[in-house]
Amino acid sequence: MRYAHTVESVRRAEAALMATLPAGALMQRAAAGLAAVCIDVLGSVYGARVVVLVGSGDNGGDALYAAARLASRGAAVELVVLKPEAAHPDGLAAALRAGARRTDKPAWDGVDLLVDGVVGIGGRPGLRDPARTLIEDARAAGTYVVAVDVPSGVDVDGATLPEPHVTADITVTFGTHKPALLAAPAVRAAGWVQLVDIGLVPYLDEAGLESVESADVRAAYPLPSGESHKYTRGVVGVDAGSDRYAGAAELCVRGAQAGPAGMVRFGGPDSVAAEIVARRPEAVAGRGRVQAWVVGSGTADRADSALRAAAADEVPVVVDADALAYWRPGMVRGALLTPHAGELARMLDVERSVVEAAPLAYARQAAERLDATVLLKGSNTLIAERDRPTRVVSTGTPWLATAGAGDVLAGLAGSLLAAGLPARDAGSLAAWLHGAASRRAAEYGRPITAGDVAGAIPAATAAVLSAPATPAPWA
């Protein structure tokens, strides 16, 4: 698991750590890590041209001390000090002593590296002149950009992406990740993220955002034992599809069969059930005892009654697609809602564009208002639950934006629920495996269908489970 902390949490941790260290030691740790990454990027430092955009405060200080290290190794370092009166004085003096020189208008042709030290985690979103123009000119020249802690101009805590902002090739962040480095849309500006350990971890509060990784999936996946049978592994009920959308039902069933549950019961219309059993003979037609329900995919005008029937069983429910419109807070304990941005916007009575601009905020708001775990699908998927850190999953591929993919995801999440995982963990594992399967199906960059994704889930699961197990970080 990768963890991200808010600006306030990082500031408190930094203050506590600095109280135990000599003055300036923490900045030197950060600068050393930043310089090491820059050296790796450059390969050969001697004679390389490096431009450093220097803002005020500690972020500019980190950049200046890193500039001193690069200049001392023979790089031709140019400093653009945006606010001389607010520049870190000791850092500026160190860089100049090492051989860096100041300039107001660098010539970008031939520059090997730009270090973005304009605004750190304490800055306001958006980028102002002259930094804006300098960044635009550097990008137009194709200059490689390393951002210090976060790309300047992004919304650090909200992970939104106001214009203008720096788009980095690499972001070197210190102590812990920040929400903007893990969650969309801001993560698109971060490039490759390199975390530098500066000793902050013992002083940090609980993370506000967690990024799910393969080890987390491996540790939490519900495996059968030697004494397991189909009922102890869990039975998942699927009420999906209609005469018009029979395909949604089959995709949902396929997703459920690709998960850990021992049986799938199909509780949709009889006309659809006959097709499902013909194509997926392992599925059992007809309602019966289940440990979880998946409701909504392709149900159209019967979504309300389908959701109510599932809720009456008092087991966890995955609420997807058409059924989302009929969700009411408190209907089911342990529910997992799986909207995309448009569906969530309708549930919250806002425009889709505002959800897409700030998905982290709206996923959290939805979990609070709707009294359920919310899995918000997108370029990276968010799993939000009241009073718990939000999770982010980024294993998917753009090819996953295809009809029926959400039906497969809902079925897989229901299978994990039926196998005993709580909604937050079921949503996390389902999203991760669904994304991993999409990458496997889209190997070599080929287009994929939802059926391809469903078919790749078992292999994606086997791949992640084949490594040694570790204790679940959230256990």
Image: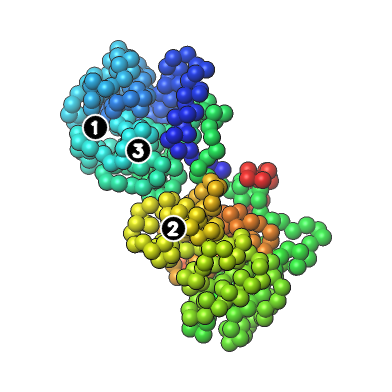
- Residue that carries the numbered disc 2 in the rendered image: 378
Which of the two marks, 1 or 2, is nearer to us in this view? Answer: 2
Which residue appears at 81% of the width and 58% of the height?
A: 226
Which residue appears at 60% of the width and 57% of the height?
A: 423
**Residue 83, placed above or below residue 454:** above
Q: What kind of residue is marked 2?
A: Gly
Q: Of residues 231 and 36, which is closer to you in this image?
A: 231
**Residue 309, placed above or below residue 366:** below
Q: Quadrant of the N terminus?
A: top right
Q: What kind of residue is marked 1?
A: Gly
Q: Of residues 306 and 136, which is closer to you in this image?
A: 306
Is residue 53 visible to the viewer in this orientation of the structure? yes
Element type at marker 1? loop
- Residue that carries the numbered disc 1 in the rendered image: 110
Q: Quadrant of the C terminus?
A: top right
Q: CA distance from mark 2 to mark 3?
A: 22 Å
- Residue that carries the numbered disc 3 in the rendered image: 151
Number of other residues with Cα within 10 Å of mark 2, as a class: few under 14, some 14 to 19, many 20 or more: many
**Residue 323, placed above or below residue 461:** below
- Position of 330 with respect to 290 (left or right) is left
- Tell me whether circle 1 and circle 2 mark residues in contact (CB < 8 Å): no
- Position of 137 with respect to 430 (left or right) is left
- Tell me whether circle 2 and circle 3 mark residues in contact (CB < 8 Å): no
**Quarter residue 192 falls in:** top left
